[in-house]
Amino acid sequence: MKGTFPLQQFHKLRTPFYYYDTALLRQTLDTIRTEASRYENYAVHYAVKANANPKLLTIIRESGLGADCVSGGEIRAAVKAGFPAGKIVFAGVGKADWEIELALDYDIFCFNVESVPELEVIEQLAAAKGKTARVAFRINPDVGAHTHANITTGLAENKFGISMQDMDRVIDRCMGMEHVQFIGLHFHIGSQILDMGDFVALCNRINELQDRLEARHIRIGHINVGGGLGIDYGHPNRQPVPDFKTYFATYASRLRLRPGQTLHFELGRSVVGQCGSLISRVLYVKQGVNKQFAILDAGMTDLIRPALYQAVHKIENLSSEAPTETYDVVGPVCESSDVFGKGVTLNGTKRGDFIALRSAGAYGEIMASSYNCRELPKGYTSDEFI
Ligand SMILES: *Cc1c(COP(=O)(O)O)cnc(C)c1O
């Protein structure tokens, strides 16, 4: 089954571009709100790095989510979209001084701190402003998510976070500081995780760490488990809204929260992934020796996930109902890795056909580059076509 798209409207637009189904986005956000509100102490943030298109950010902010930012630019984008500073958290291994100062000026909710040197800089910069920064420590729980090596972040040898062994030392260091306030622990084990067992492993680690804190009579108000819930790239129409019910219930049953603690989530891909498609047109169908190529006007500069992570996006020919044939679907960029899929089954394809690369709402438009002096793709929402 193919997705439904306003093809008539597409004819007026220059390809390639991103198309966002805002009805699906709103349905996804409604599900998140309904499922999270079963638990009184859940706070959900949207990971802005997945897609910072201002039209999407506004819809996401309207639904009441907070924002998880990984740069000063993202903090600015979140503030501009109307996210209250009190719902913004700031993560990242390499926060520059100006970014920390910006976050202090806005008085964001919390810095997710990834090293002692970073903690010291935050203390210094906060002192200079006469402010106190709330901090959570990002602990590397040494839990491997069963996903692509380039998107696991919770293993001991990753660059992210503070090791479990170092946690007590870092907390001690923090206790001696006047301008930082230690309020919680932060974790994020990876992305595109579909095996709830990975999140269970994270819960077990957090339970251990909380016991260790309690033995030291340290109480914290906040646990942040990051994001990482995956989506079904193979079947975008089968489960357009990810299974947030099971996801939230897994944490509710496995994580031992203490009275009064808030559990924070930072969801990116699962919020926006399925609502977006990259729409392109076929420039040429070229016969090779043993195969045929569908050469698109979209390339890795528009959607880099296949080249970067060997990611597979479902590809559909929106213009054709002709019998299916097999194609290598490639882009125009001068790189051999500019391939969207090999041996892809498409309805018989010809020059000018509209091709949709589905499930491209997350880590698509935002990762676009102008390599080869190509124009950045625009993003349109279904709202604009009514
Ligand atoms: C990328 C990231 C997220 C979001 O990850 P998704 O897999 O898109 O849900 C959340 N938290 C942190 C710290 C991140 O770096």
Image (tube, rainbow, N blue to C red):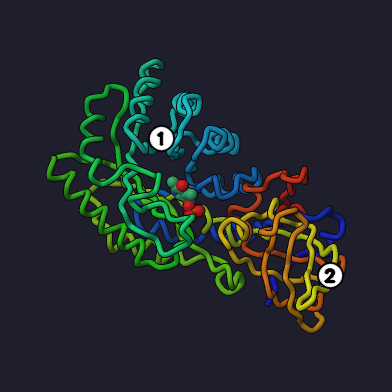
**Residue 59 picture location, percent across and down:** 60, 48
**Residue 117 picture location, percent across and down:** 35, 29
271 versus 1 height, above or below: above
- Lateral position of residue 25 relative to residue 383, left or right: left
Q: Secondary structure at mark 2?
A: strand
Residue appearing at x 62%, y 48% in the figure:
367
Q: In terms of image quadrants, where is residue 89?
A: top left
Seen from this angle, which residue lies furthest bottom?
323
Please identify the quadrant where the N terminus is shown. bottom right
Badge 1 or badge 2: first in the primary sequence: 1
Q: Secondary structure at mark 1?
A: loop
The amino acid type of the residue labelled 1 equals Phe
Q: Are marks 1 and 2 in contact (CB under 8 Å)?
A: no
- Which label belongs to residue 285? 2
**Residue 180 picture location, percent across and down:** 31, 27
Mark 1: few/some/many CA within 10 Å (<14, 14-19, 20+): some
Residue appearing at x 24%, y 56% in the figure:
256
Can I make out residue 33 in this image? no
